[in-house]
Structures are given as C-alpha cells and as structure tokens.
Image: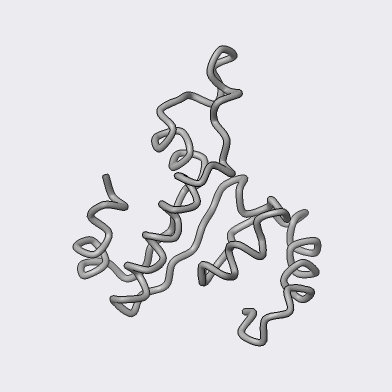
Amino acid sequence: ASVIMADELAAEVDFFSIGTNDLTQYTLACDRQNPNLGRFADPHSPAVLRMITMAAEAAHRHGIWCGICGELGTDLSLTDKFLEIGLDELSVSPTSVLPLRNAIRNHGFPSSR
C-alpha cells in the first residue's frame, strides 16, 4: 500500500528506505519463513522489482533519496538492476560491502554511485 501511495508519502518525508524482506513477503502474500510457502517468496519476482522501481521513481520526483535494506541488497545478481532503477543507497552487512563495491565499480555506467 505504501508504494501505491509513494507520491503522497514522498511529499511528507525526507527519504525512503525499502525493507526488501517485508516488501517481498507482502507483495507476494507469502511468509518466507513458512516451510510450505517460503519457496514462493521470490525476491527476483517482477512484481517486487516493479514495486522498488515505483518507490524510487516517486522519491526522485519529490527530490528525496531512496535506498533499500534487507537481504536483497547483497544479491549481486541484482546490483545492475538496482543501479538502473537509480537507488541511492544499498544498505548491506559489513561482509557484503567489498563484493558489492566491486560489482558497482564494474557496472559500466558513468553515473554509478
């Protein structure tokens, strides 16, 4: 619901920080820790990535930054996608910083942050 209301929310806040674990669970309506449903909680789902994109676009329309936190930020297979979306921050654990930094450095876009 927050993503759908992102433009209205962005007018009231200083930044967006998207919790990707919760976003995945709520978007796909399945508990990733439930042994019967966890296999359906795919954070690579086009629906989850579209929600992240929609939130980032709304944030930038209102001049605020948008970042993500959660396990998805450490998924190097999505680093290029996150840079293309224009996320301003990827919050990751200390052990993930170096691999993520290398992935960003190798991204190839002159606007990589």
Task: From this view, report whether residue 95 is shown above or below residue 16.
Answer: above
Residue 61: x %, y % from top left = 31, 76
Colour pattern: one colour
Residue at image point 40% right, 28% down: 29
Q: What residue is drawn where x is 75% and y is 56%? A: 96
Q: In which quarter of the image is residue 97?
A: bottom right
Residue 49: x percent and y percent? 50, 51
Q: In front: 13, or 2?
A: 2
Residue 43 figure quarter = top right
Residue name at image x 58 percent, y 63 percent = 82
Identify the residue at horizontal 62%, vertical 79% (top origin).
113
Q: Looking at the figure, which quarter contains the N terminus?
A: top left
Q: Is residue 12 above or below residue 41?
A: below
Residue 45: percent from the left, percent from the top?
A: 54, 42
Q: Which residue lies furthest to the top in this view?
A: 36
Residue furthest toward the front? Answer: 46
Residue 13 sits above or below residue 3 on the image: below
Total residue callouts = 0
Image x and y of residue 86, in percent: 51, 72
